[in-house]
């Protein structure tokens, strides 16, 4: 059999795909170091836009938005991870129960529903129950859509852990809780960690749903950037976008490394 | 004698399948007791019921007289050596061994000392700080053993703990396990489908098949006086021939061999009529004046002994095992030979 490399046009198609995917990111990253105010003309290397992000006229607005984004992501990822872990335990360790298939579909459905629909529905829901949109509604909405993302790595990890470890613990006089805390939880750790990181990134990055449920005057980093871009793209947006990209790459790499380590240490 | 575990009419059903169809057993204290049977006969199920991982559908399990069927696993004073060992991968060897003591609330210095002694017992003191993944299969098996013995359970349950080891190690571990049992005085309930293992170690053996206990006895009992066809065929090798029984009394039977010769032997059958007679291959000698006549078909060289695959008059296959000694005259294939049953070689089976 011929390797995929030998198909005609393989190289060209690959290069086009890579270019479409990554050239825009590269442009943003490179132009964030542009010395000129133009976003298209290169005026030499400078860190002025990074300085501008932290000290310029929009610094306070971005600072607050970043703080909101980080705290919301922290809360939402943590709660979503806890919920996802409980769900995974029920689905994988709970034996057979009625509605197991339906539960599985329910947990994963948010991955398939168009985000726009969720955004509208969530807003209508909050309005109906009379919840004022703001920080709290963003957190609630984020928890919901983070659960399936946290669930995936946790469930994958859990189904790789044989239940004989917990049984061995129970056999050695551990209560249910002790068996969970001293044996299952440490083994599940890498899954929890990468589930949490994934949820954190997803929350940090969300725009559509956040934009619907954030209420007036409340900004997260993505909505603040969008607001700023509406008045015209300045190079400081490129700097802030590059910073976000960096954080995302860091988190995803971390999640990947933790997962791989966990897999290697697994029995 | 003290009874450690008493199982009374235990039944386990999984939906439509019946894993245990009413098992009753008494296991004496301080004994090495083995459950022996083919794959799927319910051995693991019974063990898991005693450990508390499966609920009995019916019946009682008594541990030193106390009914334990409703106790949670962590409240039962029994420990298990799992088939796959199930060592905690994130804990060092010593922490694994000390785990049971930790759960029992033994303080750290005392439990580490005890765990250290257990590791000495299984010759693994040098590896105390390793992780399970850094051990060989045989070493893991010993750690699992030490871990289960450390809290001094009243009964130790072992589910085919040697099956993952190679033959040499397995044979060495048989001796060690038996020694450990004698040294600790703990009742061992050992599960295996390997009859050599069972015969070599056990004080008593329960032979199981299809969710039922077929026979309980010493190794000698089940080998030499099997009660039925299943036990005779499952334990070791045997020849079964159909005979006509003319009289039975007091566990002895008078019967007519296919050759027309009469024979008196021990009997599990209680009625006259046609029954199966079990004859062990090594309890037969080749002589011209035998009770049976056979034609040699093949001679198989086995090292320490030779196996003659013969066919009796009437067409039944019959295996004879003879020692590979210098003075043994080995018949050629095609030769007609006489077979003489040694005293007590034959056993009449019930079904
Ligand atoms: N959880 C279960 N659900 C349904 N059937 C089961 C379950 N566990 C065991 N069985 C059935 O019960 C019977 C006995 O199983 P068990 O594991 O006790 O056999 P075993 O004697 O230990 O066999 P082996 O030597 O292969 O380990 C088998 O027919 C098996 O298919
Ligand atoms: Mg089994």
Image: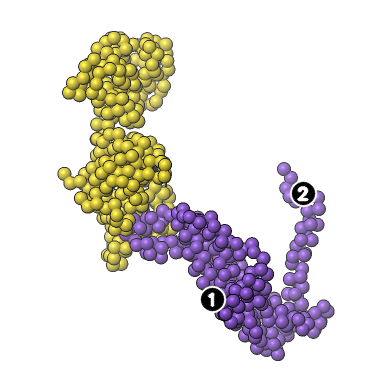
Chain colours: A purple, B yellow
The residue where tag 1 is placed is A75
Q: Percent from the top left, x then y, of residue B210?
A: 36, 36
Same-chain check, marks 1 and 2: yes
Ligand 1 found in image quarter: top left
Q: What element carries label 1?
A: helix
Quadrant in the picture for residue A219: bottom right
Q: Which residue is drawn at 26% across and 16% down?
A: B245
Q: Percent from the top left, x then y, of residue A38?
A: 81, 82
Q: Is mark 2 on a helix, strand or loop?
A: helix
Q: Does residue B190 sit above or below A264 in this rendering? A: above
Q: Which of marks 1 and 2 is nearer the N terminus?
A: 2
Q: Which residue is drawn at 34% across and 22% down?
A: B239
Of the residues tagged 1 and 2, which is closer to the observer?
A: 1
Q: Does residue B83 sit above or below A217 in this rendering? A: above
Q: Does residue B21 sit above or below A54 in this rendering? A: above
Q: Percent from the top left, x then y, of residue A54?
A: 66, 86
Q: In this image, A146 relative to A236: left or right?
A: left
Q: Is any atom of residue B115 visible in this view?
A: no
The residue where tag 2 is placed is A6
Q: Residue at x 29, y 54 (%)?
A: B70
Q: Is any atom of residue A149 visible in this view?
A: yes
- The residue furthest left is B1
Chain name for mark 2: A
Q: In this image, A96 relative to A114: left or right?
A: left
């Amino acid at each position: 059999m011929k390797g995929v490399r030998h198909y005609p046009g393989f190289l060209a198609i690959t290069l086009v795909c890579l270019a479409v995917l990554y050239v825009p990111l590269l442009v943003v990253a490179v132009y964030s170091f542009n010395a000129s105010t133009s976003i298209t003309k290169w005026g030499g290397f400078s860190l002025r836009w990074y300085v501008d992000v932290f000290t310029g006229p929009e610094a306070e607005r971005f600072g607050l938005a970043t703080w909101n984004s980080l705290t919301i992501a922290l809360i939402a990822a943590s709660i979503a991870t806890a919920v996802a872990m409980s769900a995974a335990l029920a689905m994988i360790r709970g034996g057979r129960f009625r509605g197991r298939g339906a539960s599985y579909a329910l947990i994963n459905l948010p991955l398939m529903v168009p985000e726009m629909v969720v955004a509208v529905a969530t807003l209508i829901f909050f309005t109906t129950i009379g919840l004022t949109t703001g920080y709290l509604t963003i957190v609630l909405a984020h928890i919901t859509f983070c659960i399936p993302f946290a669930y995936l790595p946790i469930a994958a990890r859990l189904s790789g852990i044989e239940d004989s470890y917990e049984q061995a613990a129970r056999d050695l006089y551990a209560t249910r809780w002790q068996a969970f805390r001293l044996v299952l939880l440490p083994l599940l750790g890498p899954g929890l960690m990468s589930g949490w990181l994934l949820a954190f990134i997803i929350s940090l990055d969300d725009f559509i749903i956040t934009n619907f449920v954030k209420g007036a005057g409340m900004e997260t980093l993505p909505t603040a950037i969008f607001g700023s871009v509406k008045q015209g793209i300045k190079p400081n947006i490129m700097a802030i976008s590059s910073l976000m990209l960096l954080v995302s790459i860091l988190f995803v790499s971390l999640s990947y490394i933790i997962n791989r380590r966990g897999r290697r240490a697994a029995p | 004698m003290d009874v450690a575990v008493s199982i009374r009419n235990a039944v386990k059903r999984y939906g439509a399948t019946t894993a245990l169809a009413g098992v009753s057993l008494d296991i004496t204290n301080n004994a090495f007791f083995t459950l022996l049977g083919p794959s799927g006969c319910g051995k693991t199920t019974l063990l898991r019921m005693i450990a508390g991982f499966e609920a009995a559908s019916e019946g009682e399990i008594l541990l030193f007289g106390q009914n334990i069927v409703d106790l949670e696993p962590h409240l039962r004073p029994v420990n298990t050596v799992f088939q796959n060992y199930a060592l905690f991968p994130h804990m060092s060897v010593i922490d694994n061994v000390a785990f049971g003591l930790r759960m029992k609330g033994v303080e750290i210095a005392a439990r580490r000392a005890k765990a250290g002694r257990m590791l000495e017992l299984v010759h693994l003191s040098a590896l105390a700080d390793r992780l399970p993944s850094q051990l060989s299969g045989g070493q893991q098996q010993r750690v699992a053993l030490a871990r289960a013995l450390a809290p001094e359970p009243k009964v130790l349950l072992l589910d085919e703990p040697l099956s993952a080891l190679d033959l040499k190690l397995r044979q060495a571990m048989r001796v060690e396990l038996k020694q450990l049992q004698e040294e600790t005085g703990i009742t061992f309930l050992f599960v295996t489908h390997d009859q050599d293992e069972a015969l070599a170690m056990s004080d008593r053996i329960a032979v199981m098949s299809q969710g039922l206990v077929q026979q309980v006895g010493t190794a000698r009992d089940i080998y030499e006086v099997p009660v039925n066809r299943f036990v005779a065929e499952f334990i070791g090798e045997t020849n079964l021939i159909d005979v006509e029984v003319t009289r039975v009394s007091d566990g002895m039977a008078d019967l007519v061999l296919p050759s027309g010769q009469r024979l008196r032997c021990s009997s599990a059958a209680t009625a006259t009529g046609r029954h199966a007679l079990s004859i062990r291959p090594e309890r037969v000698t080749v002589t011209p004046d035998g009770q049976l006549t056979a034609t040699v078909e093949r001679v198989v060289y086995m090292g320490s002994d030779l196996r003659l695959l013969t066919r009796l008059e009437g067409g039944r296959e019959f295996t004879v095992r003879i020692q590979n000694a210098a003075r043994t005259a080995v018949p050629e294939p095609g030769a007609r030979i006489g077979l003489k049953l040694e005293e007590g070689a034959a056993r009449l089976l019930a079904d």
